[in-house]
Image (spheres, helix red, strand yellow):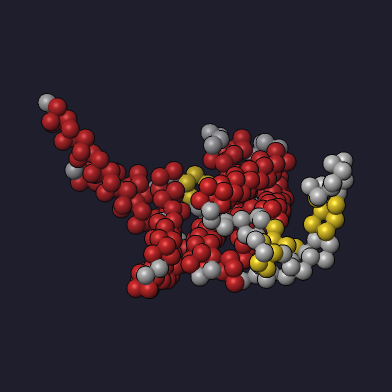
Amino acid sequence: MRKLEKDARKRVRKQEKRNFRQAMEKEIREHRSSFIVFYILRALVIIILVRQLFQGHYESAFFCGLTLLLLYVPSWIQVKLHIELPPALEITVLCFIYAAEILGEVNAFYVVVPHWDTMLHTLNGFLAAAVGFSLVILLNDNENLTFDLSPFFLALVAFCFSMTIGVLWEFFEFSMDWFFHTDMQKDTIVHAIYTVELDPTLSNKVIAVPNIRDVAVNGESLGLGGYLDIGLIDTMKDLFVNFLGAVVFSVTGFFYARSKGEKKTAAQGFVPSRKKAGRDYLQQAREENSGKG
């Protein structure tokens, strides 16, 4: 009896995996625009992965493999959570993943391209606000009730959610740098410091050290032309541009909510919705395959 039950559960799990794969294939092809972007980016990542393996750059190859998995995340979310991502949001997320992992990490755009990290953090603030805004809608049992809520409240939730994600990410960057000696919090060269640590009177007086042109460590010049700030300025800059991205979406989200979803704003193309029966591909796969069984 136990063996029969075990075999039955195994068949159910196998069938559910088949249903999920079938739903994923349909989901990826659902929107022509996001489908084209997905396959172009995936092809590029595969080419770069092969190249990195041939060159023996295994850390970069790892980032390529991670990117391949992340490119499937938008479709996975739609199938698993039964929600519909607008093509604009899906394409933006796909491009963000490619820009962060392949261009940023593998091709070192974070170092060689000025303000690359700033651009991505600004975009992240916008996208995280869109997610926060959407959570109120998706977690609400009654969609009509959503737009009865204060538009200011919805905008505030979006803003606070985005800033929370931004702060948590900076915590992650600091933890990686502190415990694993990475350099996720990029350093900044400054030419003046102001600190009470140099006050010999211990009276909390700020001592200024202006016009710094060189810094020596253990008797050797760093050759940077200034003082090396360890991550603080980068962190605050990232949080500030995250703030700007969050504000932009929150403002457009406010007007979107005030019009009850009818007024076209930048928020409209970035707000997910619940899947309708005609586009719930997982449920369709279950019904089709159960009928065959």
Residue 54 x, y percent position in the rendering: 34, 73
Residue 120 x, y percent position in the rendering: 61, 60
For the point 47% across and 63% down, the residue is 34
For the point 79% across and 65% down, the residue is 212
- Residue 248 visible in image: no
Q: Is residue 108 above or below residue 134?
A: below
Q: How many marks?
A: 0
Residue that protrudes farthest toward the top in the picture? 1
Q: Is residue 183 above or below residue 11?
A: below
**Quadrant in which the C terminus is drawn:** top left
Residue that protrudes farthest toward the front in the picture? 219
For the point 34% across and 51% down, the residue is 23
Q: For residue 270, which quarter of the picture?
A: bottom right
For the point 73% across and 41% down, the residue is 152
Residue 224 x, y percent position in the rendering: 69, 69
In front: 287, or 24? 24
Q: For residue 15, which quarter of the picture?
A: top left
- Residue 231 visible in image: yes
**Quadrant in which the N terminus is drawn:** top left
Q: Is residue 137 toward the left or the right of residue 102 in the image?
A: right
